[in-house]
Image: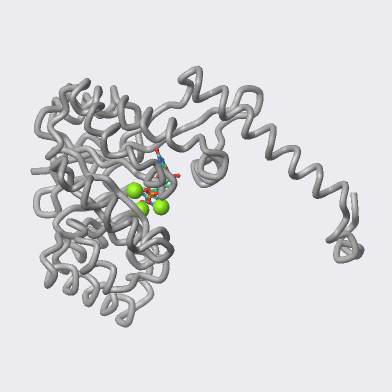
Amino acid sequence: RAKETGRGRYENYRPEMDAEREERNRLEVDLRIAIERREINIVYQPVVDATNWRLIGVEALARWTRKGYGPVPPDVFIPIAESSGLIDQLGLFVMHRACERIADWPGIKLAVNISPGQFRDPEFSQHVASMFRKTGTDPSRITLEMTEGYFIQNPDRARAAIARLKKLGVEIALDDFGAGFSSVGYLRQFGFDRMKIDRSLVHAMSEGDHAVQTLQATVALARSLGMPVTAEGVESEDQALKLRMTGCDELQGYFFGRPMEAHEIDVIYRTDRGRDGKRIA
Ligand code: C2E
Ligand code: MG
Ligand code: MG
Ligand code: MG
């Protein structure tokens, strides 16, 4: 292995790049097998009403434990699924499983993440519709979360895809707002129903007035466009209270609950208890 001093010289070292590519290929092969064998697990993170901290929804998040290695974070395997064409199968699998599970939680909404690649399938909205029928899911309980990247690259196709999905009766949320380019124009022209504020904006609140003002302006903007706002990455009571005052109607973050197994949501749902088992309303 190259020592620190010699690092620069090895930047274009071929065998190393081959090794990297090989490892990536192995990851892809293992991921494909895991999806086929349905070894992708789904965890659910609570979403609470900002005014009383009661559970009103969950976000489904995919988890993969790679055999012989351990957990692989979604930020690693989702991009692999996207670039290898596995995302369609993975995405529908997550949605299907999660829709089956929320049958146990009447009145609770479900948010599912959608990758841009899934839009490339012109029949995506039909797949979603037939999945709703099979699982007996009321589409009005479902939020599909998307990030802005695709809208910048393919505005026309994105607009058409969103329109088809909205016809099914689902809510469409713009995920991670504030993390990237985040143009206001996109909010308006694509007809998002909800804005999810990225946790980087939430965490920046503690850095002072300027960040708080940015956040306030962002929420005010969303609301002026008629969009309710969910804040992500809420890690403290102080943040939760401030975000409520700012006008966020839903909160999500470690303060209220980490992504957890469905049976743990069962308990919260049954007892209507909040964080740490304390009664919260
Ligand atoms: P996301 O949709 O923005 O999901 C929120 C992420 O923030 C989750 O990371 C969650 O665990 C994390 N998080 C929640 N609360 C807090 C908090 O208080 N503090 C901090 N530091 N983090 C918090 P996770 O589960 O690692 O997922 C990362 C991303 O991977 C997701 O971001 C989403 O873009 C993607 N992803 C996960 N599952 C799926 C899936 O089934 N399909 C697709 N297309 N993407 C998925
Ligand atoms: Mg999300
Ligand atoms: Mg997000
Ligand atoms: Mg994200």
Q: Residue at x 34, y 27 (%)?
A: 261
Q: Image check: 128 left or right of 269?
A: right
Q: Is residue 26 left or right of residue 241?
A: right
How far across and how far down the image is residue 71, in percent?
55, 32
Q: Position of residue 21 (x, y in %)?
A: 74, 43
Residue 167 in the image: above or below residue 232 = above
Disc count in the image? 0
Residue 108: x and y in percent read 14, 35
Q: Quadrant of residue 227?
A: bottom left
Q: Residue at x 14, y 57 (%)?
A: 249
Q: Residue furthest bottom?
A: 210
Viewer-side residue, 179 vs 237: 179
Which of the two residues, 130 or 44, is positioned nearer the viewer here? Answer: 130
Instruction: Say if 72 sits above or below 232 in the image.
Output: above
Which quarter of the figure has residue 3? bottom right
Q: Residue at x 53, y 23 (%)?
A: 34
Quarter that holds the C terminus: top left
Q: x, y (%) of residue 25?
A: 69, 36
The residue most toward the top is: 37
